[in-house]
Image (cartoon, rainbow, N blue to C red):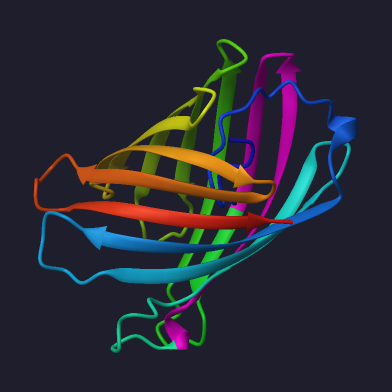
Amino acid sequence: MKYNWLKPVVVAASIAIPLTSMADVSGYLSSTLTEPTGSSEDTGLIFELGLLYEAESGFYTGLSLTSNDVLDSDTKAKNSTAEIGVGFFNELSDVSFYDLGLTYERQLNNSEKEEIPEVYFGLGYSVTEALELSGYVYKNIRSSFDESRVELNLEFDAGMVDLMSFYTHGFEDDKTRLLEVGVGKEFIPNNYISAIYGADLRTSRDSYLEIEYTYSF
C-alpha cells in the first residue's frame, strides 16, 4: 500500500519500483457497499473519486471526494467529504520504504465545519515478493482534539487472489479497535473488486461486510 491516505483498494505487490517509473497523474473511481452484520443498521452505499500527482523525487499530492450514503434518505450531498493531502515517499532499499505527509478532510457545505487535519508517518517492508507488511501512525493536529492511531497492514499475493488484513488501534480519545480481513482480485486490467469483513473488537455488535469495486486510470 503505497500511499496510505489515498487508497481505492489495497493490492498486494512488491514495493521495489524505481521512483523514475512513477506516473505523473493517476486516479480511481470506486463504489463501496457496506452491509452491517452485527446490528440493525441499514445497508450503505458510497462513491469515491481520487486523483494523485506523483513527482519523480517522491513528492506527491492528491485529492479525494467521498459521497454521502446514497441509500440513506436522511443524508444529503452536503454530507459528502473532501480530503486533500501532500506527502513524500522514499525507498530505503529494494524491499523497504517510508512515507510521511499531511492530510486535511472536511465535510462539504457543513455549517459546523467538521475538519480533520492529520499528520502521518509509515514504514513498509516486503518480506517476499508476495508478502508486504506496513505500519502507519496518525495524529490529529487540531487543537481541540487529542486523538492518534496506529494502522498495521498485511498484504499477500496468493496468485489467484490478494489476501489482506488490517488492524487499527486508537489512542488518547480515539477508542478504535478495528480488525479487517479480506480478499481482492483484479478481474480485468484496471478493474478491482474486494470483499472485506470488519469487526470492532470492543463489541460484537459493530461488524460489517464491505464489497468494493474500483476502476483505476
* Magenta highlight on residue 96: yes
Quarter-of-image position of residue 120: top right
Question: Looking at the image, which residue is at 56% across and 30% down?
Answer: 12
Q: Which residues are magenta?
A: 77-102
Left or right placement of residue 4 versus residue 55 in this view: left
Q: Main secondary structure of the magenta part?
A: strand
Image quarter for residue 4?
top right
Kindly identify the residue that appears in the image at 69 percent across and 46 percent down: 189
The residue at the point 57 percent across, 36 percent down is: 11
Name the side, left or right, on which 185 lies relative to 42. right
Taking depth in this image into account, of 60 and 33 the one nearest to the observer is 33
Q: Is residue 41 left or right of residue 135?
A: left
List x then y, in percent, for residue 160: 51, 28
Q: Quadrant of residue 41?
A: bottom left
Q: Of residues 143 and 30, which is closer to you in this image?
A: 30
Q: How many marks?
A: 0
Which quadrant of the rendered structure holds the N terminus? top right
Visible residue check, residue 152: no
Indicate whether residue 121 is drawn in magenta. no
Can residue 69 be seen here?
Answer: yes
The quadrant the C terminus occupies is bottom right
